[in-house]
Image (cartoon, rainbow, N blue to C red):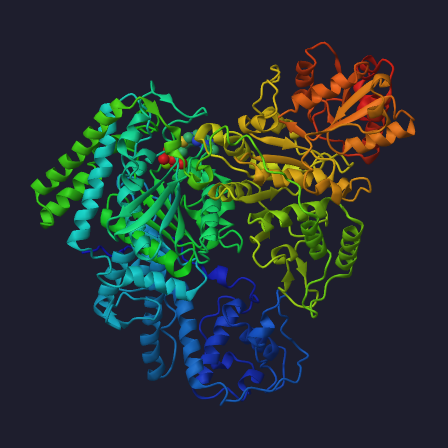
Amino acid sequence: MYTLRTFWTSGPKLARGVLSQGVPAALRGTPAQPARLLTTSVQQESFLNGSSSNYVEEMYLAWLDNPKSVHKSWDVFFRNAQRGAAPGEAYQSPPPMAAMMPVQPVAWPMMPLPAAPAVTSEQMSGKVIDDHLAVQAIIRSYQDPSVGQELGSSDEMRTRIETVVPHQRMHAMIRAYQIRGHQCAKLDPLGIMEADLDTSTPRELTLPYYRFSEEDLDRTFVLPQTTFIGGGNTSLPLRDIIQRLEETYCQTIGLEYMHINDREKCDWIRQKFEIPGIMSMSNETKRLTLARLVRSTRFEQFLATKYPAEKRFGLEGCEVLIPALKTIIDRCTEQGAESFVMGMPHRGRLNVLANVVRKDLDQILCQFDSSLEADDEGSGDVKYHLGCSHMRLNRTTNKSIKLALVANPSHLEAVDPVVQGKTRAEQYYRGDIEGKKVMSILMHGDAAFAGQGVVFETFHLSDLPAYTTHGTIHVVVNNQIGFTTDPRFSRSSTYCTDVAKVVEAPIFHVNADDPEAVAHVCNVAADWRSEFEKDVVIDLVCYRRGGHNEMDEPMFTQPLMYKQIGKQPTVLRQYAEKLISEGVVTQEEYEEEVSKYDKICEEAYQQAREEKILSIKHWLDSPWTDFFKDKTRDSMMVCESTGVGEDILTHVGTFMGSPPPDPKFTIHGGVKRILRQRATMVKERWVDWAMAEAMAFGSLMHSGFHVRLSGQDVERGTFSQRHHVLHDQNRDKVFWTPLDNLWPDQAPYTVCNSSLSEYAVMGFELGYSMSNPNALVLWEAQFGDFSNTAQCIIDQFISSGQAKWVRQTGITLLLPHGYEGMGPEHSSARMERFLQMSTEDPDLYPEIDERFEIRQLFDHNWIVANCTTPANYFHLLRRQVLLPFRKPLVVMTPKSLLRHPEARSSFDDMLPGTTFQRLIPDLGPAGQNHEQVQRLIFCTGKVYYDLTKERKARDLDDKIAIVRIEQISPFPFDMVKQQCDLYPNADLVWAQEEHKNMGAWNYIQPRIRTTVNRERHVSYAGRASAAAAATGAKQSHQQELTRLLQHAMNLDNHVALWQSQPRRNLTG
Ligand SMILES: Cc1ncc(C[n+]2csc(CCOP(=O)(O)OP(=O)(O)O)c2C)c(N)n1
Ligand SMILES: [Mg+2]
């Protein structure tokens, strides 16, 4: 039997004085008055007759008390009447709903009155009035218990009110349970904390709030359509209503769904929880749940016994996570899912691997043996970060399913978007456009879920057409603590799950010590995803039995909580006792289940002890088996030619320069001009940057490689250079994407403007790139420096992912970079950061042979490039996919070079036989007459064009050679050496437009020195060190550039000159 919340609320009642504020002093506090208070004009209104006069009187009294307490139409009416409107003219019919739609407040007409028709008694039916009256009475009865007694002079009215008013209150009460019942649910297994951080009972969940008395409890009420608690009954006694509401909303499940702005979805959830008996579970399922709890619990106990001194971030206190995940997977498999991509933090990861993914136990246990040597390259990672991919039979449905747990860094929640991208890609490759076959499950810790911004960013991708995975099931291991911090100090939101409300995800809080309730919400979550293809959150409110890890002492910081935890029996014990007492299992059966699993663990332990080698490859979350099939390290040392036949270049170019085939499609005049320019390019056989890019994409898709370009405003291009999606100027949502329509059998092209996020979107594209190697997946920053808000993805995944997890990716980052006088925030893509994370040794001159170029790429962690010609960019992009292995590519892309008249390439530079040039030598007069050259300038990127212009202006073309390093990392040692040897009499200068502590200087200098065996000096020409990436003043920018060029071209005493400049002169 449930206790009814019958105590009076402690909250203050609204004082009458508050309600009457703003009413003329003469009328303030006026007691209920008869109709004579109405002004003459009011009494003369044609619709005031019969019962309506009572109603009007009621309205009038209410209006006198507070003009805002009545509908606006009454307010206008009474005000007009008081101002002396003629009979029949005081009433103004309210504007129709449509007129009220605009954001501007609707100004209702006051005197003088327009000629609106007066309302007749026929129009204002008695029923409408009665209903209004009842509603008004309810509203006011909440505010003042005495109201209602003086209402209605007729018996009929009193009867109506006596029926309608309690019903309305009952409706409000049901609604209150639906909205706020979760606040009274018994969610904390320890019984000491409130999951919503609030110990008070909402007033709306108390009987007195509705002015129901004990006698009312036996009164029968007709149930509204917004509840399903009646089951087959359309009416119930109030006592039963409350009991059923308490059962649904205030036991071990707390439901949050009333924030969903969709009646159908709310009803769907109500049906899943309110219908009496809906949570009943078969004995078979109960036994299965118990068996899963046995595995989950005994696994942790086994590890604790065998490896007491090892960190494993045990799941103790939330062992129910395992049956929960398995229930989700069973249900989703029944609904057609075949592949699950999962992301999770440290806690319980080994248990998930062992008992959900069903990774071989001995392989898991090997991870505890620190003496085992890894057989693969790479530095590896700790056991609770490794991913894996595994096919297994789902016993419940007898279907084969794939489970992938994505490897992740320590950075909590960083894996979320990666999982989503990988899921989306898998859906895409399977043609699973509704996400019926492939789905993601994300697990979270309570503190991280609330605290990490990437959670929010990832939620925002969930419903975007090019990013949705058609619903993710989120499971929060809410142990009510984050390391040593209590929830009240780690979040400002009510629940740790509130972030999910931004996408109107339903949130099911559940007490993790009630395995059946957990199973129920898991089934509903799976059904929700299947039904609506939207995200849903399960909040497993649990506790952490030990410290943050196995070495930690929790009593230092949470003494009371841990005293309680000390007394808390495991959920396994509680549930086993329950099922034994219910007769669902016997004690012997239970013990047999336990010893069966203990034996499995022991055998795996013995087997693991026999392992000699640790294979990181067993832990790949995206194995790419076909891609690597029959490949050896040796066979991977060749790369296909990146040049392309002229027919393909012409075809792509022509498409890019043609209007859409639909004659009704109207394109913008500016776009027309661009298309004309593109047509000219094809005719004249040259390309600019955007055209080269389109040709790289088009030619790859022609060869069957999918291309996906994502980032902010990438469809048009930040600099209006790309225009990959043309918009009909007259019809909404009518687009034309030429690159997706080049050939009927081409691989598809996806170009998508992303949400304004870097962290989540870059993570998403990284995940996408991991799914299938046969694709070019690019993420573009609006400006290169914005990529630093995704630094975690760059540092933890892209630069180091292969080393940690032997996992390859060809993700390509396009980072607009270049000093154009646009200020500190739009100039630098921070190339120094990427270079600093490059792995090759600056002090070691490598062994050079004919395979050096590709071997270097293979051995390196990533590629950093900064091209100066469209053709080289074209080759770089193509090489990215034609390489026999995958490496991340970071490209500093240009801004002004997009339209620079010299930054053009001929078709000839892209034809078969041409290739990516890691370094572009000087082919001008200096390159013809090496001995006479006094200076060899190395540079990268657009400054090359400034340098050549200045050199020409100074007539130094034969004295200064300018060589471009296009692939900065891995460093083209071999080619740089050739150049240095070619100009034996030249001094060596590195010229850059970035500040000295930025750009490539710190990376380049030691490598050139190593190349020349430290026998020649390398000096610097560029901006001085600075804190901000660039000056904010255009004029200073120009001065800095002038000085840079002067210095680079000054053949006398350049080192001393530059370095002796006072700082202020350099920065302006
Ligand atoms: C981005 C990030 N910041 C800080 C940490 C350090 N850290 C590791 S676990 C942890 C507490 C996590 O609490 P919660 O999310 O509730 O998970 P729990 O450990 O309780 O399961 C912290 C702060 C981290 N791993 N990642
Ligand atoms: Mg926690």
Q: Residue 526, relative to residue 561: is it above or below?
A: below
Q: Quadrant of ligand 2?
A: top left
Rendering quarter of residue 157? bottom left
Residue 237, x across and y down, in percent: 23, 69
Residue at the spot x=49%, y=60% of the render?
17
Q: Residue 374, relative to residue 184: is it above or below?
A: above
Q: Is residue 788 left or right of residue 718?
A: left
* Residue nearest the viewer, comparing 557 with 800: 800
* Residue nearest the viewer, comparing 1006 with 775: 775
* Residue nearest the viewer, comparing 250 with 757: 757
* Residue nearest the viewer, comparing 98 with 243: 98
Q: Which quadrant does the C terminus fall into?
A: top right
Rendering quarter of residue 490? top left
Residue 552 visible in rendering: no
Q: Is residue 40 left or right of residue 606?
A: right
Residue at the spot x=62%, y=58% of the render?
741
Residue 890 visible in rendering: yes
Residue 902, x across and y down, in percent: 81, 39
